[in-house]
Image (cartoon, rainbow, N blue to C red):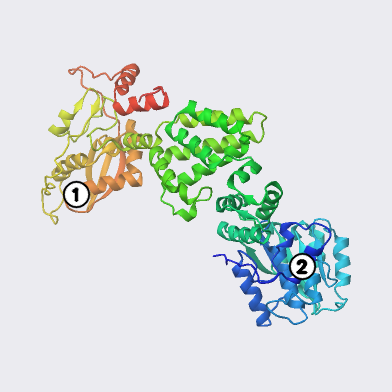
Amino acid sequence: MAKKTTPPAETSPARRDEEKSPEYVVVARRYRPQSFEELVGQPQVAQAMRNAIATNRVGHAYLFTGARGVGKTSTARIFAKALNCEKGPRATPCNECDICRSIATGEDVDVLEIDGASNRGIDEIRQLRSNVNVRPSRARFKIYIIDEVHMLTNQAFNALLKTLEEPPEHVKFIFCTTDPEKIPITVLSRCQRFDFAPVKADAIVERLRHIVESEGVTAESEALQLLARRAAGSMRDSQSLLEQLLSFCGATITADDVHAMLGTARGGALDRLAARLVERNAAAALAELNHAVNEGVDVGQLAEQILGYFRDMMATAVGCAEDLMLHTGVSDQPRLRAASEQMGLETILAAVQILDHALIRMRQSAHGRMLLEMAVVRICALENLDELATLVSQMRDGDATSGRTPARPVTRPSASVSPSPEKKNAVHNGHATSSVKNQDSPPAEPDFAADRELTPQIVETSWRRAIDELAGLTKQYASYASAVAISGPNRLVLSFPENYNFQKEQCERPENKQKIEMALKTVLGITVALSFQTSPAVSPPTPSEPPRRGPTRQQLIAEIRTHPLVQEAIRLFDAEILKAD
């Protein structure tokens, strides 16, 4: 948790020096933290630095990593002041002595701040190596702060290795980078690494409130929250935005001022547009979008706002707490909760994908508004995908509540196990329907005791009952078995005709095999292990019996089309049946 800071009783001498400068000093520099207590959002780093100084365990090389504007360079300066302070070394620099004040302004001769991007070659590192042996002019340590150190070349890193591992006692290195992955592992292993986390929005708001109060300006809480969310964890970005507002506004900063400066939609306009999307009202949504654009809202910013709104709606739909909302405030939670319940999680996810795809295309196109309007219409045209997911699940496993299973061919292989009378009555018009069982009736008792030896007759009878215990596609695949036999103690083997190898492979899948074994255990009362094999193809019927002809492809398609689940899938996807096996 970021530590909340309060305005100091008196302005530090370093800050007074900047305020007395004839040139204007920007907010980010004027309110740069001058001690570890003022450092916002990095309590773990501040505590480690203070403890290192207090216990005399200061290393010779440090690596500060993290995103832009999270306090890496400020921490390096504070650490340098703590080491070289005339009253130190001490965990809290005095900020009064000449050394502290010169380090704070970046002008101290013994604390050298080097830009790694412009001093990246081997020649500059050779110059640095020759200077490290020169003792500091007035301070205890000569400290090198190299910013964006990952910009150094491989040759420069190699030239620095020996000096970095065994520098003179009076030299300390502090490296700062936003991309630690580009630093060679040989350099990383010689440094103490500290990762700076993005600053939390609440901590940014507190710091911005302190700044506006010090500047004699009032600001709405919502305005500061908008700045903090826009900064995305960067303290410097938030202070730069505040700098713009101080020039843009008068004595009061409002949320409307922030929206006007950033080109974003006001909260009410965004809520209205999101509500039209949830209602699937494309015409009203386009009208709201047009109204926002006419008020000066940038379409790119508006697309990002809508995407953030749906992101928080997604988080609400899965049950996240309010502190995980990144783009909306506490007052928006009731609307988000109602909208997420109305749309459903699957539909929200589809809308997020549509908006993300539209944003990518908008960055590469001159027709940003048209692309955003197309995305809005596509979201309004979405079906209720949560219901669709239920339908797909029913089509895969069968609808147990209605007793229906997916359609299957009329022609069936001849089997040594004849279907039960109930099963014969359930086959009608090419559809296999399972009889609905009374949920209140107790389960059927096994036909024999658990310790009784299995016989072919018991196995055959039990297999017919086990098929009735199955449901969905597993039941359909298992019903194609032509024979069941005993292969060993508590072991059975299912035989499938050669022309039904697909059904055999489906039954061999672990999840289907487990369902079949559980059905057999329910009927037999004992656990049996299943194996599967392929038997020779079934011989054709005798001449005395007329051959049975299966339905044609057109007949199968027409029959499958009558299934309610298939009809619903055709309606939702505008699909067409191309093949029927």
Q: Between residue 361 and residue 511, name the one nearer to us.
A: 361
Task: Give the side of residue 443 with respect to residue 324, left or right.
Answer: left
Q: Is residue 540 above or below residue 498?
A: above
Say few, some or many: other residues with alpha carbon within 10 Å of mark 1 (under 14 / 14 to 19 / 20 or more). some
User: Residue sitting at 44 percent across and 52 percent down?
Assistant: 320
Q: Is residue 352 visible?
A: no
Q: Please, what secondary structure does the residue beneath circle 2 have?
A: helix
Residue that numbered label 1 is attached to: 522
Q: Nearer the viewer, residue 415 or 560?
A: 560
Give how far across and how far down residue 486 sits, in percent.
22, 47
Q: Which mark is residue 249?
A: none
Reading the image, the residue beneath label 2 is 16
At label 2, the amino acid type is Arg
**Considering depth in this image, is 93 or 131 the residue closer to the camera?**
93
Q: Is residue 391 above or below residue 129?
A: above
Quadrant of the image containing the C terminus: top left
Q: Is residue 2 left or right of residue 100?
A: left
Q: Please state which amino acid type lies under the numbered disc 1.
A: Thr
Q: Is residue 205 left or right of residue 18?
A: left
Residue 81 drawn above or below residue 549: below
Say whether residue 29 is visible: yes
